């Protein structure tokens, strides 16, 4: 995928955009996260996660594991490895979006800025995220 | 890059991974097939000058497949050919819809300019129509263009002069004039839907 042209990336990006309305895809979560965090455009989102636009598109095109899935942590690890993104960041994002997506936007915006929430979310993920892949034996 | 169809085995493996619940399978399928599909559709349908329409067809093919992967039967054809077939169908549907829309708009425009000429006994239907429609067209430029349409002027040059674009290429003039006319027709159709346009003459126009 390193030889992806700008045109290819653009058309993959369009597909990701189309999937923003489909809650089965991470594109859906990314679009809501962007709104919650007042980020303008996908480039700002990529910058926030320290990844390239291509990595962001790859991430968006993955299926979204629901945070209550029993295998949530391992699925997040797999997706994160595929898209080269930090698994804890990804898990936090998915949980935050699920937590707030039914809330009125003003409440969600306020809550998003609450440091204590973010800290709590990080704690939960660190508790549930399995060790790094090199220490895994059977996944 | 990606000019050849991805190997059949690649498609089959990725399809099985998608069915098996691999979260990254859609991304890998899109990466493997969408660039190829886009190029293939471009070479097969180069007569379609609107690249956006072709890209949308390719994207819709992928989306439909993700929505219903079981619709693809790997024992019957490759994933690439399945997606290509789907994209072709989507493109043809889109072209048909666009054609039908254009035909309808042209018919409306034709009816607008085919109003009977004024007689001594009754006021010109065209004049009446212009008076009725004018308040709905806020932009004075739209009002002037509409007057030409109602008077049956078909020559693009006349519209170009009003719009001040007569020094541009003929293609560009035609494109801009058509865009402005379409916009006016759409405004009238919307006004009719909202019940703001009720003249009997307009009933005849079938707006």
Image: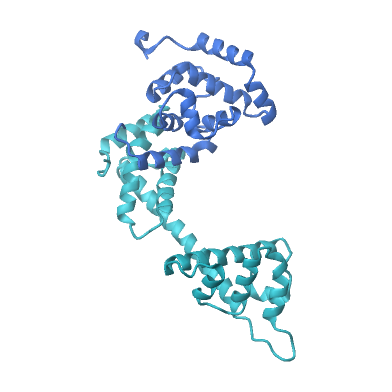
Number of numbered discs: 0
In the rendered image, is residue B36 in sight?
A: yes
Quick check: B106 left or right of B122?
left
Say which colour chain B has. Answer: cyan
Q: Where B161 falls versus A72 (above or below)?
A: below
Colour mapping: by chain
- The N terminus of chain A lies in which quarter of the figure? top left
Quick check: A61 left or right of A119?
left
Q: Position of residue B85 (x, y in %)?
A: 36, 50
- The C terminus of chain A lies in which quarter of the figure? top left
Q: Position of residue B13 (x, y in %)?
A: 31, 32
Q: Position of residue A107 (x, y in %)?
A: 69, 26
Residue at x-position 34% and y-position 42%: B35
Q: Where B86 falls versus B175 (above or below)?
A: above
Say which quarter of the image contains residue A118.
Answer: top right
Residue extending farthest bottom: B120
Q: Position of residue B30 (x, y in %)?
A: 38, 37
Say which quarter of the image contains residue A61.
Answer: top left
Say which colour chain A has. Answer: blue
Quick check: B107 left or right of B126?
left
Front residue of A105 and A25 = A105
In the rendered image, is residue B34 in sight?
A: no
Q: Where B75 falls versus B128 (above or below)?
A: above
Front residue of B15 and B177 = B177
Quick check: A43 left or right of A5?
right
């Amino acid at each position: 995928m390193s030889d992806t042209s700008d045109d290819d990336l653009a058309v993959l990006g369009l597909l990701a955009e189309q999937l923003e309305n489909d809650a089965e895809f991470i594109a859906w979560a990314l679009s809501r996260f962007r709104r919650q965090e007042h980020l303008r455009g996908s480039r700002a989102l990529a910058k926030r996660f320290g990844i390239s636009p291509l990595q962001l598109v790859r991430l968006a095109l993955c299926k979204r594991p629901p945070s209550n899935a029993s295998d949530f942590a391992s699925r997040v690890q797999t997706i994160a490895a595929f898209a080269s993104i930090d698994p804890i960041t990804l898990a936090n994002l998915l949980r935050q979006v699920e937590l707030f997506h039914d809330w009125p936007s003003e409440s969600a915006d306020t809550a998003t800025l609450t440091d204590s929430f973010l800290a709590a979310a990080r704690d939960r993920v660190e508790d549930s995220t399995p060790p790094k892949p090199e220490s895994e034996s059977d996944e | 890059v990606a000019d050849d169809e991805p190997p059949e085995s690649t498609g089959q493996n990725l399809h099985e991974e998608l069915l098996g619940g691999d979260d990254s399978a859609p991304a890998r399928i899109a990466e493997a097939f969408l660039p190829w599909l886009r190029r293939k559709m471009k070479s097969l349908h180069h007569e379609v000058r609107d690249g956006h329409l072709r890209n949308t067809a390719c994207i819709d093919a992928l989306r439909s497949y993700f929505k219903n992967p079981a619709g693809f039967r790997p024992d019957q054809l490759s994933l690439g050919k399945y997606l290509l077939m789907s994209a072709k169908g989507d493109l043809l549907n889109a072209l048909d819809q666009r054609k039908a829309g254009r035909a309808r708009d042209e018919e409306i425009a034709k009816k607008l300019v085919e109003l009977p000429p004024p007689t001594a006994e009754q006021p010109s239907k065209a004049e009446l129509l212009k008076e009725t429609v004018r308040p709905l067209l806020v932009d004075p430029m739209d009002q002037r263009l509409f007057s030409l349409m109602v008077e049956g002027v078909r020559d693009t040059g006349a519209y170009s002069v009003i719009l001040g674009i007569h020094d541009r290429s003929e293609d560009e003039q035609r494109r801009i004039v058509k865009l402005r006319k379409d916009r006016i027709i759409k405004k009238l159709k919307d006004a009719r839907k909202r019940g703001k346009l009720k003249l009997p003459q307009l009933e005849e126009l079938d707006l």
